[in-house]
Image: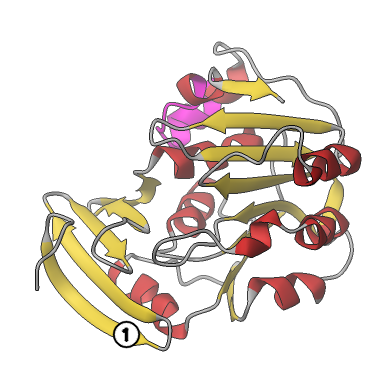
Amino acid sequence: MSLRLRGTVIHQTEDALGSILVLDHGKHRILSFDTVFEQSKIARGKPHLPVHEYNRAMLLPIAFSLPRRATILGLGGGVLVGALHYLLPECELHAVELRPQVADVARRFFSLPEADKVRLTIADARPALRDMPTASTDFILTDLYGADRMSPAQSQRRFIDECERTLTSEGWLAINYHRMPTLDGRLYAHIRQLFACVLLFKSKTNNYVLYACKQYFEPLGPEDPRLKALERHLPIAWSTLMARVRAA
């Protein structure tokens, strides 16, 4: 088999949606669905430390408000779950993953935390979100991707409606977009109608993380003590990342 991703395949399986591969390359472990794109990536010696910049950026709302309950839509290798559990061990985490075999791979190869505060649901994110009680979570991180494209759910106004309904009054939504929604389009206008604060981060790989909150916040300055405190616990360059966040 000819791989475009560099590394040694240490596990391979498949389900109705396609291949699921785990590769080791140097100090890193990679989850891929097609041998082209990295779905998840960890440092094997520090699996709680996100490697991809957009994953790190998705955690930035913690600097504004520490969640007691967080929801992760799209488990992948469990990178976001691992980082959140390491940083906030008392936070109740609920991850939703469509593919049972992806969840199994996250447990076996990516050190997905097994803890009372971590709950995993195998389901489609859309009905799972609809089933959640109103104002039941403080943080929603949505990273729904298949082998070669983003799930269309993340660009649907009904999906955004359900995120807004499920969030608490001070809750944050963080969405990983492969392409930024058009600023004069219906989706972006809808987000602006629902949320008082909309912020943007552009990664070096041209992913966009969109943040939304019902209360208005300005991006923090790089010397803010909240960022310094987070850096001591989880060193992912919080200040550098926050410096690239812009008000939409």
Relative to 43, 99 lies left or right: right
Confirm whether residue 71 shows in the render. Answer: no
Tally of numbered tags: 1
The quarter of the image holding the C terminus is top right
**Residue at figure coordinates x 86%, y 70% from the top left:** 133
Q: Nearer the viewer, residue 116 or 179?
A: 179
Q: Nearer the viewer, residue 91 or 157?
A: 157
Type of secondary structure dominating the magenta stretch: helix
**Residue at figure coordinates x 84%, y 27% from the top left:** 216
Q: Quadrant of residue 184?
A: top right
Coordinates of residue 220 in the picture (x, y in percent): 65, 18
| 201 up-or-down from 155: above or below | above
Coordinates of residue 199 in the picture (x, y in percent): 69, 30
Residue at which label 1 appears: 14
For the record, the magenta segment spans 228-239
Residue closest to the far bottom: 16
